[in-house]
Amino acid sequence: MVTIKTPLQIAGIKKSCRLAAQTLQYTASFLKPGISTEFLNQKAHQYILDHGAIPAPLNYNGFPKSICTSVNHVVCHGIPSPDHFLKEGDIINLDVTTILDGFYGDTSATFGIGRISPQAQKLIEVTKKSLNLAIKNIKPGRYLNEAVGKTIEDYVHSFNFSSVRDLGGHGVGLKFHEAPFVFHFDTPQNRIPLRPGMIFTVEPMINASPNWQVFIDQQDGWTVFTQDNSLSAQFEHTVLVTPRGHEVLTKI
Ligand code: MF3
Ligand code: CO
Ligand code: CO
């Protein structure tokens, strides 16, 4: 069941989304070669607490940290570690989800560390553009699969990249993950007409190869890797469907 949020709920979710976006920006300001992913986790964790909120990932289904840090061929759900130091040429996705007054906001972005390869730069650009092209299509009466999934899939295919199929976006706001599951490729399962008051994430994970397949780390049970070791990038926004179109709630 896809829920329609009330004006009061929307107001609360907007505040949480704004804090998530601010946390992401704040945490990214520390990115440089030589810092650990655990250092980023601590910065985000403290910032969220200082603003009266809770980091949603911490203890979520046993996840051990407050944000996800996904480097290079890690697709998503990377676990911050004091032993993992960033180096020039890496790309890293920071994924922040806040709970403020019980309401959830979810956003992520991918950054380059120092000078990165032209291939990595292109991947980041294409991934961000695919998200923005999808968001532009969001308005009442459009179908979710055409507005979002098909748009992302068609765009990234034109660069010989692929859109990961095993993970997706999600309704969000009153819980971390709500209906609908948002596929980043065209499927009749997402033939859902958009209606004002729906809130969901769009968060394409794009691989720098035509192979969309992934696997999960057997040791930690979380880290998702590209099957062929190719780079992967991701951007995520929480989006509200409005009577006239949409509003991106995690934009600063
Ligand atoms: N923030 C991720 C998402 O966009 C979910 C992370 S789940 C966690 O849906 F447990 F790894 F934090
Ligand atoms: Co999400
Ligand atoms: Co997220």
Image: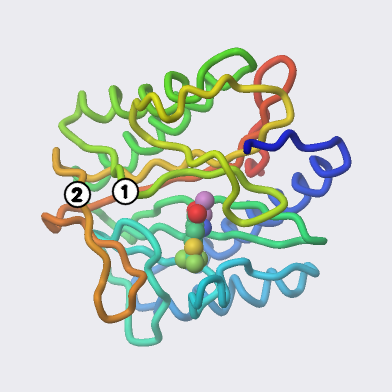
Check the picture and name the quadrant holding the C terminus: top right
Q: Residue furthest right?
A: 8
Q: Which residue corresponds to the image point at 27% horizontal and 51% vertical from the top-left?
A: 232
Indicate left or right for 39 with 229 as reference.
right
Tell me if I can see residue 56 in this picture: yes
Check disc 2 and report the residue beneath it: 213
Q: Which residue corresponds to the image point at 40% horizontal and 78% vertical from the top-left?
A: 35
Q: Where is residue 38, by image quadrant? A: bottom left
Tag 1's secondary structure? loop
Tell me if I can see residue 89 in this picture: no
**Image: 109 above or below 128:** below
Q: Where is residue 50, by image quadrant? A: bottom right
Is the residue indicated by label 1 positioned so its CB lies within 8 Å of ligand 1?
no
**Image: 165 above or below 116:** above
Indicate left or right for 240 with 143 as reference.
right
Residues at circles 2 and 1 in contact by the CB criterion of under 8 Å? yes
Indicate left or right for 50 with 24 as reference.
right
Tag 2's secondary structure? loop
Residue type, numbered disc 1: Asp
If you read the primary sequence from the N terminus, does the residue marked by circle 2 or circle 1 appear first? 1
Q: Which residue corresponds to the image point at 33% horizontal and 74% vertical from the top-left?
A: 221
Residue 46 x %, y %:
66, 77
Residue type, numbered disc 2: Gln
Residue 67 x %, y %:
52, 68
Q: Nearer the viewer, residue 106 or 142?
A: 142
Number of the label disc, if any, that sits on residue 166? 1
Q: Where is residue 222, by image quadrant? A: bottom left
Q: Residue furthest bottom?
A: 83
Residue 43 x %, y %:
58, 75
